[in-house]
Amino acid sequence: MRQYSGYATAADTNERFRYLLEQGQTGLSVAFDLPTQIGYDSDHPLSKGEVGKVGVPICSLGDMETLFHGIPLGQTAGVSLTAQQPDNNVIRCTVQALAAILGGSQSLHVNSRDEALALPSEESAQLSLRTQQILAFESGTADVVDPLGGSWYIESLTNDLEAQAWITFGVSTKWAAR
């Protein structure tokens, strides 16, 4: 299980990461603030009002060291990307994006193949955009409200989940349907 997190300062986010790992998380994904994502330091004029607002600001190697202090680097990733064989990340991201669409996602970001190594190259960013466009406009999955509607397997999973929920609430499933 992976948790996407990052806020306030590198030290605050490190504390949150440690808590998540103590609670059983097996991986971490860093949510960087907008200035960090577009390459601005916190003191840049265009960063005003955005620093730490959503995500963690990282302006130096020291911030990165603080962010991951005491955390094994095997617990971190750019979502589920790998630095080894980065071209395989294209497939990973496509499958993840398709799963999000099939799950009803209203908003989607597809990581670039080389984000596990550094900020994405122009070529990788374009490939990521094209992946999203193909899924949105060519695959047909976004053309209907529920692309898996009527699937016996999905319906079966949903029914099982509902029955377990009623049991958890202490209600007999025969009474729940009424």
Image (spheres, rainbow, N blue to C red):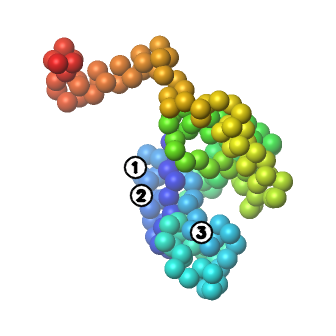
Q: Nearer the viewer, residue 106 or 170?
A: 106
Is disc 1 placed on a helix, strand or loop?
Answer: loop
Asked which secondary structure carries label 2, the reply is helix
- Disc 2 residue crowd, few under 14, some 14–19, many 20+, Cα 10 Å: few
Residue 54 placement (x, y as % from top left): 50, 67
Residue located 52% across and 53% down the image: 4
Residue in view at x 81 percent, y 58 percent: 121
Residue bearing the label numbered 3: 34
Amino acid at pointer 2: Tyr
- The residue lying toward the viewer, choosing from 156 and 80, is 156
Please report the residue visible at 23 percent of the width from the left and 25 percent of the height from the top.
166
Q: Residue furthest right?
A: 123
Residue to which mark 2 is pinned = 19
Residue 95 to residue 112: above or below: above
Q: Are marks 1 and 2 in contact (CB under 8 Å)?
A: yes
Question: Which kind of residue does numbered mark 3 sit on?
Answer: Leu
Q: Say left or right for 174 vs 131.
A: left
Taking the spot 31% from the left edge, 24% from the top edge, the residue there is 162
Q: Is residue 141 left or right of residue 52?
A: right
Give percent across and percent down for residue 131: 73, 42
Q: Secondary structure beneath disc 3?
A: helix
Mark 1 vs mark 3, CA separation in Å: 28 Å
The answer to whether residue 156 is above or below residue 64 is above
Image coordinates for residue 128, horizontal then vertical, percent: 73, 48
Query: Which of the two marks, 1 or 3, is nearer to us in this view?
Result: 3
Among the 4 quarters of the image, the one containing residue 118: bottom right
Return the residue nearer the eye: 50 or 136: 136
Q: Earlier in the sequence, mark 1 or mark 3?
A: 1
Q: Answer above or below: position of 59 versus 88.
A: below
